[in-house]
Structure formats: C-alpha cells, structure tokens
Amino acid sequence: MSRVKGVPRIRSLLRRLPDTTQAGIVAEFNRAGPEIATVMRGRAPFRTGATQAGISWRVQPGQMRLLVGLISTPKGRAKLFYARIQDLGRKAQVVTVTRAARGARALGAVSISGGRKVGAVSTYAMNVRAMPGKHFITGSYRVFRQRITANLKAIYARALATAAAAAGSADA
C-alpha cells in the first residue's frame, strides 16, 4: 500500500481507462521488469547465488502494478530471510543463545518438556555486529524510474488525447 495521498483514486481511474491504454501500460511494465531484475541481481551479494536466484519480477495487470525483488510464496521468502537483512541492514545487539551443551544431544541428555529444553543446556550472550544495508532491492533505481515515467506519460497523453477527441465529437 502506498503512503502517497491520492494513489488509490489514481489507480481506480487507471482501471477505467480503455483496454488499449491498459495494454500499453502492462506492455511497458513487461519491458521494464526484466531489466530492473537484472540490475538488482548484479547489485545483490553473491555467496551461494540463492539471493540472486530469488530476485524475480511480476506484473499484476488488474492492479496496474509492477513488482520486482524478492517476491515468492511465504515458504520461498522464508528460505531467503537473510537477503532482507542484507538489503536493509541490522543494528548491533546482544542476543541470548540457548543450545545443547557439547555432546549432550548425542548422548540423549537433552529432552524437551512443555516447549522448554531440559537437561544439559548452555545459555550465553552473543554480540551481533551492526551491518549496513546493501540496498540492492530497496535502493534507488532513478534511471529506470525516469524512463518508465517518460514512457507512461506518452501512453497517458495518447489516452487523454483520444478521450478529448471522443468528447469533442460527442459535443458537436
């Protein structure tokens, strides 16, 4: 959901545009989606390649929306949870870690009772360093936005000219 005022009204206006205008907008999104996804993959960190493989794009024609980034099913996004941390960064913090003591699990000394571990358990504090965001998904893609905006302005201008001509001929 957008935080810009008036976006829902504009979207409803766009849905009422002629089919040819909607088809032109969807075609522009289909042209831009793969280009943006390719640039995102190039900016994404590469260790195993999973983050780059997780970047995809999708056009939602009914909502007049282009989605580019880590879009997938919830299960697919869960596999890439660290990609979001890499993109946005994290604050420095101290976390409490609870784990089985060395060799205790192999000996069967740890049992689970009521959701809590009972037996040989080790608890300690661990420092997690701050990590600045890489912004490979949420970063600025100004060149693409400017090009898409220019192409969409041309589509809107044609649609408005056609609507004005139709209204002018209906008045006469």
Image (cartoon, helix red, strand yellow):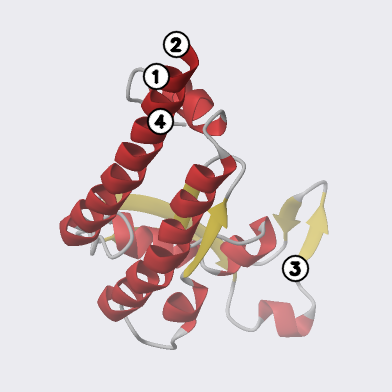
The residue most toward the front is 172
Q: Which residue matches tag 1?
A: 168
Asked if the residues shown at circle 4 and circle 1 are in contact, with their CB atoms under 8 angstroms apart, the answer is: no
Query: Which residue: 76% across, 83% down?
Result: 107
Asked if the residues shown at circle 1 and circle 2 are in contact, with their CB atoms under 8 angstroms apart, the answer is: yes
- Neighbour class for label 3 at 10 Å: few (<14), some, many (≥20)? some
- Neighbour class for label 1 at 10 Å: few (<14), some, many (≥20)? few
Q: Earlier in the sequence, mark 4 or mark 3?
A: 4
Asked if the residues shown at circle 1 and circle 3 are in contact, with their CB atoms under 8 angstroms apart, the answer is: no
Give the structural element (helix, strand or loop) at label 2. helix
Say which of marks 2 and 3 sits in front. 2
Residue type at mark 4? Ser
Q: Is residue 54 left or right of residue 37?
A: right
Is the residue 27 above or below the residue 110 in the image?
A: above
Q: Earlier in the sequence, mark 2 or mark 4?
A: 4
Say which of marks 2 and 4 sits in front. 2
Residue type at mark 3? Val
**Residue 30: image x %, image y %?**
47, 64
Q: Nearer the viewer, residue 146 or 118?
A: 146
Q: Is residue 63 left or right of residue 131?
A: right
Q: Which mark is residue 110?
A: 3
Q: Which residue matches tag 4?
A: 2
Q: Earlier in the sequence, mark 1 or mark 3?
A: 3
In the picture, the quarter occupied by the C terminus is top left
Residue type at mark 2? Asp
Q: Distance of mark 4 from mark 1, alpha carbons?
A: 35 Å
Does residue 122 appear anywhere in the picture? Answer: no
Query: Which residue: 53% across, 52% down?
Result: 23
Q: Earlier in the sequence, mark 2 or mark 3?
A: 3
Q: Distance of mark 1 from mark 3, alpha carbons?
A: 82 Å
Q: Nearer the viewer, residue 163 or 98?
A: 163
Q: Which residue matches tag 2?
A: 171
